[in-house]
């Protein structure tokens, strides 16, 4: 099942830079592993913002929830979730 | 260049059904041609809504504008546009 | 999979009453069949409003989409969809 | 009387983890006792968020207020309350 | 049980004046009967607007719903409902 | 003159409990004195929230302002004010 | 007592021009009479919009309500009302 | 040129009282000097709020900007600015 | 004086196409004359929308108001106006 | 490609003044270099606010993102981005 997830990261001004860098490094590794596993299908940066648009391909909402809760940056994020369906006009076999 | 476009279609209750069906058929053909051309990369339905989430891969904002203005359903749509960039964590070569 | 769906019905002031009543009768039969099928788990009226809060138990987002698109009152509705998960504190076996 | 309550938990980034865990443990016990008492009818997690959708079955608004004020996580919560009625299309005897 | 209900009336510009006057007359009679019955405790006009703030004293949400659905002006109204409790600082015996 | 005032109290998580209790005790005494004086006509708790709906009966906006500025909890409050008029349908002599 | 009232006029595209002009002429006369009476203290146009910002000096909210209800353009208006007080920094005797 | 400016002051709960009082005293002197200069035409308190509605009469937007930036309370303020014009219905020579 | 004006055009679905084309032709001529006069400094299309972002260079708010009221498409527009100043970091002599 | 970017700066009340001044000095130098390079086409101050409206002329969204991420004040900013196109009514050759 596909979900669109939009994540916006807000790191407080006074949060220690090294600690933030450490978390971001973990976030990147975590995201790339999920991309290799085929769970995190797409990730794009929104121009000018510390936000991304992502497409997840998971078993169900529970799996999505576990994945998002595991994001190292989760405590710093605002998150919006929309469940997606195959679009009747789509010609791509994997956009479902 | 990539853009995320979210489209919501609002057809008035008293709009003639056959006319609407005609426009939707044209919309589908128009969308599928652009998908085959590689301009309209992805299209997903938002569950429960007459809305879609789409990713366009175009030369620039002018080409995006021409494509959207040409949508047969454009006069019935609310549209939101966000410019996207490659995300530094992405492992997909074509998510740019 | 569970989804919470909130539906608000807006029937135009000048819509013929008999036609509206006919649609509402179909809506009721459609809803009750889905309740008997176990797809539409719960439906409550929001006090004072022509709105309901519903819980659907479906295969996936596609099945939810088909069900909602089939609602006789769908063209008159504003709809909000949220994907739900089992809550770790829940003691009810079927709240998943 | 039934109420839908939506709760979103916001624990500050610098709140001590052990203290938060202690409060969450109390919250879970408190919630499960109320579920066993039949006051807290349903609780679902909203996918991807630290939020829940709950249905309470209480004597009146005062009882609901006492219950919510007693939530160990209450000081960290944003809360939305809607009074519910039996829906005329419902076929479940206990959805009232 | 007490509820605060805020009602805003929007009568379309092209709605026949006599018909509107007829409905308003029925609305007034309906409201005053409920006030005499002790169900509609208070009603105030919001200065400058075609809106009112009302306090209802009813058995439960179902009774409130029946009363509001019966308002002759209901199809023209936007409505907001909040369940109220006795306030611990109140010195009025009947503000519950 | 009547005003509806809605107050929502937000006490920071790290505010000392005893100090908060002291302020709340003063708030209660202040409110009850104004109720006895007939200035603060009604006060209700909004179910589930640390909010109240109040009706004030004052000389004019200046008197209302002085009263609200004097609330011990004022620095913690979000406040909304609406001027009220007698409603033409009201049958209560004192709802003006 | 002073009130700030912001009015935005929305005349439907298909409303007869002569009828609109007639109403606007009456509105102007009505406004100017109230200005001469000292009730409508100030009126300014918001640049670029069919909106005004006005200051009324009236006995109380009831008088304000009667005046606004009498506006020939009232059925076409969105209206926002705020009660004002003398500001402690004001040096103008009549800004109260 | 006239501008309507609405200012809302938010002083943090833990800001030292004497320091705040010092800034407010400077604010008052600053405001009154500008009122005497004819730049700050009107200032009213919004009832119940730590907000004001002001009318400025300045050369242009640059002068307005300089004046607002100089407000001792500026760092604590939310500010909304609207450019005003003479209203065609105004009978006051100085409401321009 | 400079103003940023954002205009969004909404032409009703059932508005006659030839009449709309006629108005758009007039709008274009009107806009281009003002551009040649130096009053309408910049105009850009917002990608994907029937909206523009414009910069006006006018004597004052009254002149801006006259210009905007004269737009042939004005009755179809939503408009937002912000007064601009020279930015202290600008290196362009004419960005004032 | 052109983008409109609106930036609002929020520096916390307790942020050290000298540090803020240092950052602002760097911001100015950074902005002016980009203006000289032709990347940052226009920058205007919004009257009364610590906000600017800017027009960027960049290769694509990635270049815009790099530029904005490099802003010394970026961590203090709220940012809104809109992709722009040449407007068919524009008579300026460089408004594209």
Image: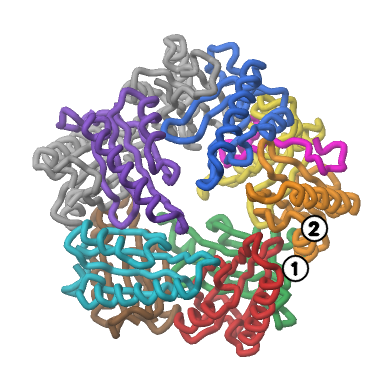
Chain colours: A blue, C yellow, D orange, E green, F red, G brown, H cyan, J purple
Residue at point 65%, 54% (across, down): D78
In front: G15, or D96?
D96
Q: Is residue F58 visible?
A: yes
* Chain letter belonging to callout 2: D
- Quarter holding the N terminus of chain E is bottom right
User: Same chain, marks 2 and 1?
Assistant: no
On screen, residue E12 above or below H45: above
Q: Which residues are magenta?
A: C69-96
Q: Which residue is mark 2?
A: D1
Q: Which residue is mark 1?
A: E1
Residue at point 60%, 45% (across, down): C9
- Is mark 2 in CB contact (under 8 Å) with mark 1? yes
* Chain letter belonging to callout 1: E
Toward the right, the furthest residue is: D36
Other residues around mark 2 within 10 Å, as few (<14) / some (14–19) / many (≥20)? some
In front: F52, or A69?
A69
Q: Position of residue F55 (x, y in %)?
A: 58, 77
Residue at point 64%, 25% (across, down): A30
Q: Is residue G87 left or right of residue E54?
A: left
Which label sits on residue G60? none
Check if residue C30 falls in the magenta segment: no
- Quarter holding the C terminus of chain E is bottom right
Q: Is residue C2 left or right of residue G17?
A: right
Residue at point 44%, 78% (across, down): G61
Other residues around mark 1 within 10 Å, as few (<14) / some (14–19) / many (≥20)? some
Question: What is the quadrant of residue C3 in the picture?
Answer: top right
The Cα atoms of the two marked residues, 2 and 1, are separated by: 11 Å
In front: J33, or E23?
J33
Q: Position of residue E4 (x, y in %)?
A: 64, 66
Q: Is residue D71 left or right of residue E41?
A: right
At mark 2, the secondary structure is loop
């Amino acid at each position: 099942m596909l979900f669109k997830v939009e994540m916006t990261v807000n790191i407080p001004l006074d949060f220690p830079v090294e600690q933030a860098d450490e978390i971001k490094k973990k976030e990147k590794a975590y995201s790339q592993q999920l991309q290799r596993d085929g769970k995190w299908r797409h990730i794009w940066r929104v121009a000018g913002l510390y936000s991304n648009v992502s497409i997840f391909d998971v078993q169900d909402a529970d799996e999505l929830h576990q994945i998002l809760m595991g994001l190292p940056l989760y405590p710093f994020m605002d998150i919006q979730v929309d469940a997606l369906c195959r679009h009747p006009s789509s010609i791509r076999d994997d956009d479902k």
